[in-house]
Image (cartoon, rainbow, N blue to C red):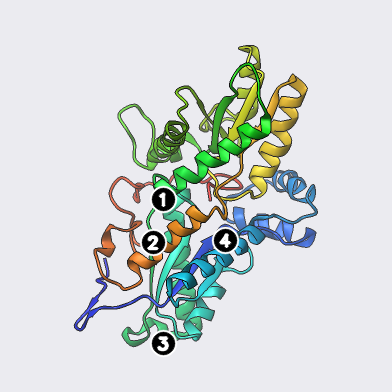
Amino acid sequence: MTSSLAPGGPVPFDAVLFLSFGGPDGPQDVMPFLENVTRGRGIPRERLESVAEHYLHFGGVSPINRLNLDMIDALRADLGRRGIDLPVYFGNRNWNPMVEDTLAEMYRSGHRRILVFPTSAWGGYSGCRQYHEDIARAVAALAEREPASATPAGSVLLRKLPQYWSHPAFVAAGADAVRRAVDQLGPGEVAPRLVFTAHSVPNSADAASGPAADGGGLYSRQVMAASQAVADALGVADFDQVWQSRSGPPQIPWLEPDICDHLEDLHAQGVRRVVVYPVGFISDHLEVVWDLDNEAADVAERLGMDYVRADTVGTDPRFIEMIGDFVETYATGAGDLSAMGCGDNGRTCRERCCVPAARPTRPAVAQPS
């Protein structure tokens, strides 16, 4: 772990990188984007074309880039109110602006110590370690573009901010999103069933993220704990945790039940009113609007169920202030930076976050980001 301390004391950070998954900005981007997502995994062309139809249904534009820019604007305003003069840059794993290009821009603007906010709240490979790989890849690309960056005098340090799945602001924003959804559903004789969803991953990937005695992994335990925290904030004793957006061959087991299958089961049990909260996502990007606002909503309509999908936390002021608090806490370079969200510049994650010796099979198309 690289020390944050210089002989004269803590060394401040000088910029923030908002790091996300990326998404196409038009029909011409869809297949190149999906090829970036799945590069090296041997995904059949017909599978990519099937997923491409989801994007083309919305004109080939994923809302994720716009939503991230909205959050960045809100974060810039929050930092400005605090008097924190740190520029916020935007970089993606799979589409423009690519993180490699963004880091090169930051370096040429003189930035050497960078705090990284990832758009995933979770531990595990897809939710955490892969962001460290993004950082490492960007640093390696920078060394090729700007050889001076590989020297001690020109070295850069990117430090990923902590996971936030249990942060009170994340929980409070989620609880209020559910309250709004319940209000939208309207009064009824029976309270609606509260269903939490998150991005499914292969069971092997979940187990590799830090196995528990019951066979579950770190990622699924975190998702359940976050759902429990939101339910507790609402005073809801009984709720369901399900999954969405699985991909890959059917012979590989993934976390389940799937949200659409679960709606069928609830209907068979006599449930007619449902509020779904996508706790696993921080913005309404394509997997949310396709899987929940289209597929799941269609299932609910066919079954005659009253169905409302709650908002993601997005630009909720408390969530943005949480990011600002992280930046303010660590911007000076003081404190124990090794206790943050895992390693620096792509090094191994902290104990039980994920298992570096046995990388799990990655999802075929998308991840919980």
Q: Residue 326 carries which label?
A: 2
Q: Mark 1 — residue?
A: 164
Residue 144 rendering spot, x and y as whole percentages: 48, 80
Q: Where is residue 276 in the image (x, y as percent from the top left)?
A: 60, 33
- Residues under numbered marks 2 and 1 in contact, where contact means CB atoms less than 8 Å apart: yes
Q: Which amino acid does label 2 sit on?
A: Phe
The residues bearing labels 1 and 3 have C-alpha atoms spaced at a distance of 34 Å
Label 4 sits on residue: 71
Q: Distance between the residues labelled 1 and 4?
A: 16 Å
Q: Where is residue 334 in the image (x, y as percent from the top left)?
A: 26, 70
Q: For this rendering, which residue is in front, 68 or 159?
A: 68
- Quadrant position of residue 7: bottom left
- x and y percent of residue 92 in the render? 57, 64
Q: Residue beneath label 3, please?
A: 148
In percent of the image, x 20 and y 84: which residue is there? 8
* N-terminal label among 3 and 4: 4
Residue 232 in the image: above or below residue 167 = above
Label located before the other in sequence (1 or 4): 4
Residue type pointed to by label 4:
Met
